Image: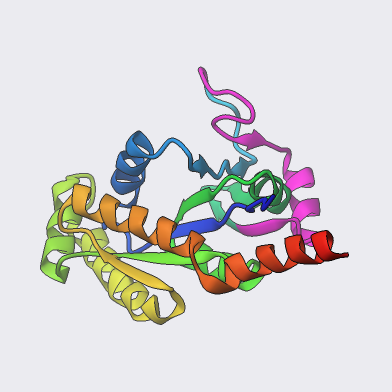
Amino acid sequence: MIEEKGILFVLSGPSGVGKGTVRKALFDKDTALKYSISMTTRAKREGETEGIDYFYKSKEEFERMIEEKKLLEYAQYVGNYYGTPKEYVEETLESGKDVFLEIEVQGALQVKENFPQGVFIFLFPPSLEELANRIINRGTETEDIVNNRLTEAKKEIEMMDAYDYVVVNDQIDTAVSKIQSIVRSEHCKRERVAKQYKKVLEAELG
């Protein structure tokens, strides 16, 4: 019996490209995927649950995990740490479930360094003009922040070479279908399947 392990899929792309929207639409259609739960040092908010919204840790515990290299990636925002716990991801993959991580470009590059066997998908805007419109239409940023975000987005787009796949987010449903196709094709990859078959054959032939 071939027991297939899960695969870590990392969805990333520049700010304003719609990563969160695509991830939510994907999860509405694909219940087999497991969303990677992040770890944080920020206080639990009302209505949040440990192990569902986040894993909550003290600053000391989090820093110990950084030292012990127990995180696939981490970053600090507004005085709090956020990161992806390695053990949780590995245990979920071992149980045969795919893990899906939606993350900023810098975080994705950290994951690639710590977990190169992951599959990295870059979500690309239909155009820079469209990306600018999306950032502006949020209506929450000043002109300076919008310009900084666009400069940053251009830099992030240049990092596309680090990824395995590129999906253009012009239509959410189309982007979701393409990501589903990537998930299916990765499970059929010869080197992935061959390793599992060889193990089974060795066990059976002794």
Q: Looking at the image, which is closer to me, 22 or 18?
A: 22
Which residue appears at 21% of the width and 49% of the height?
172
Q: Is residue 15 shown left or right of residue 100?
A: left
Q: Position of residue 181 (x, y in %)?
A: 34, 58
Q: Looking at the image, which is closer to me, 90 or 52?
A: 90
Q: Taking the image as drawn, is residue 117 in sight?
A: no
Q: Is residue 169 above or below residue 156?
A: above
Q: Is residue 111 shown left or right of residue 182?
A: right
Residue at the outermost right position: 206
Which residue appears at 43% of the width and 73% of the height?
164
Magenta extent: 46-73
Q: Is residue 16 shown left or right of residue 195?
A: left
Residue 151 falls inside the magenta stretch: no
Q: Position of residue 111 (x, y in %)?
A: 58, 65
**Which colour assignment does the render follow?**
rainbow
Q: Taking the image as drawn, is residue 25 in sight?
A: yes
Which picture quadrant has residue 26?
top left
Q: Looking at the image, which is closer to me, 179 or 106?
A: 179
Q: Position of residue 156 (x, y in %)?
A: 36, 73
Which residue appears at 48% of the width and 63% of the height?
188
Q: Looking at the image, which is closer to me, 35 or 72?
A: 35
Q: What is the tally of numbered marks visible in this picture? A: 0
Residue at the outermost top position: 47
Q: Is residue 173 above or below residue 190?
A: above
* Quadrant (top left/top right/bottom left/bottom right) for the C terminus: bottom right
